[in-house]
Image (tube, rainbow, N blue to C red):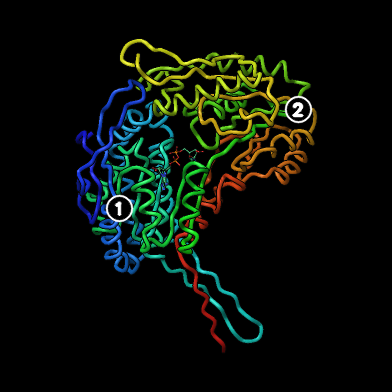
Amino acid sequence: MPSTRLANLIDGRLQAPLENHWLDVYEPATGTLFAHCPDSTAADVDAATQAAQKAAPGWAATPSDERARYLNRLADLIEARLDEFAELESRDSGKPVALAKRLDIPRAISNLRFFAAAITAWDSESHAMETGAINYTLRRPLGVVGCISPWNLPLYLFTWKIAPALASGNAVVAKPSEITPCTAALLGELSIEAGFPPGVLNIVQGRGPTTGQAIVEHPAIKAVSFTGSTRTGASIAAIAAPQFKKVSLELGGKNPAIVFADADLSDENLDTIVRSGFANQGEICLCGSRLLVQRSIYDAFRERYLARVKALRVGDPQEASSDLGALVSSEHFDKVMRCIAQARDEGGNVLIGGESLKLNGRCTNGWFVAPTVIDGLSNDTMTNQQEIFGPVVTLIPFEDETEALAIANGTGYGLAASLWTTDLSRAHRMANQLEFGIVWINCWLLRDLRTPFGGSKQSGVGREGGVEALRFFTEPRNICIRY
Ligand code: NAD
């Protein structure tokens, strides 16, 4: 890391926050302070927005293949320092370095390259009328847009927003999470090297209720793309609505993984089912935290599943042998431990885990929680209704398809479901009735960046990915010509 004090990127220059206030950034695996992040105010956001306003017309007028070249250059620069990014991401978030190397950073690079390619291949629609007229659609960039991202997949989700925003010709004011600000700061430095014109990409670091809210409130920011908690999403929607701002909200989840007796429970599939609960310490919005299992195989499945969960190694994120690292912050660690205590109070049987872990050596003060599996709780308990966002999975038996559907849909959230069955008709029938934005059948987290990504109900509004993201970041204009 270049310095322990991270900078904002405003108008193409790395800058300290105007009021010179800083936030502490901790390494979750050791509980130690290792960096300081700007505690930016509305004045910093305003400076960034003014720079973006100045840059926006020139960027919008830049041909899309040239915009794509900037994005590709940035992707190449990140790729050249992939190991450094992965180590930084791990240090900042507590996730295993190996996971950041395999998933987070490669995906951030893919996001930039994908939208660089997508913008050059994007067609406009046209509609011919038999009465002698033709319509075509012009899509213009919005101007200045805001991108706000969370801590669980820091660079992955940050680039998932800024890439389509920039590709479609907008100037951006972006804010990563103050809990994991490091890789976005490094990306900011590399964007200067990539040659982006000053003001096209601005990164303002700081807290949600101050810096983040200032982005949402700023009248010159025409749209806000947000990923984070449902509570924050509601407050953003309330501020944006009276200003008629476009919002894309990617929020929380309480996702079901549904295993039928006819599922192919090969070792590989079982490993995926385990991963779907515990990858990234369960801190992925798409994790299947409610594992629904058909009663006829419940006992046998539980035994095999628990044996696998028991084999997961929680350890120093720097070690290649660690499957799970530390939770992201002491506050989040406390929240997850409170949820486990609540599950016990509600009458749940903790089958495995259920406690924090004290590691030896440099990680002795880290925020580690043992992979935890609980059963004996009905679907209407708090444990099965609230997003825990940690390494905690509940097992819930069901009799048949009807009951599985009722339990799966019996949540306020609607982000993702996964379904394990070899019955093709059942798979299609269920997929049609599951009230989730994403349904994976016999897989999990298999992502094609062209597909619509997002949730229904309290999991969000709008979709990201592919043309959905390009549509979000542009304003369509219909031109009708009579001939
Ligand atoms: P969070 O809502 O606390 O914060 C997310 C971002 O919003 C951060 O950058 C934060 O600083 C900012 N923020 C906070 N308050 C704000 C405000 N009032 N105005 C503007 N910005 C504000 O969420 P988190 O704890 O960082 O992330 C975890 C949550 O994100 C979980 O609920 C998880 O399910 C969700 N998530 C959803 C998806 C998805 O694609 N649906 C993906 C990842 C995470």
- Would you name the residue on which mark 2 appears? 398
Amino acid type at image mark 2: Phe
Q: Amino acid at mark 1?
A: Ala
Q: Quadrant of the N terminus?
A: top left
Asked if residue 98 shows in the view, the reply is no
Report the residue at 38% width, 45% height from top: 209
In the rendered image, the residue lying farthest to the top is 360
Q: Residues within 10 Å of mark 1 (few under 14, many from 20)?
A: some
Residue ID at (48%, 31%) = 283
Q: Is residue 454 left or right of residue 118?
A: right
Q: Position of residue 185 (x, y in %)?
A: 28, 42
Residue furthest toward the bottom? 483
Residue behind mark 1 = 42
Residue 141 on image: x %, y %:
41, 65
Callout 1: SS:
helix
Horizontally, residue 54 falls left or right of residue 262, namely left
Q: Residue 49: image x %, image y %? A: 30, 59
**Crowding at label 2, few (<14), some or many (≥20) Cα neighbours within 10 Å?**
many
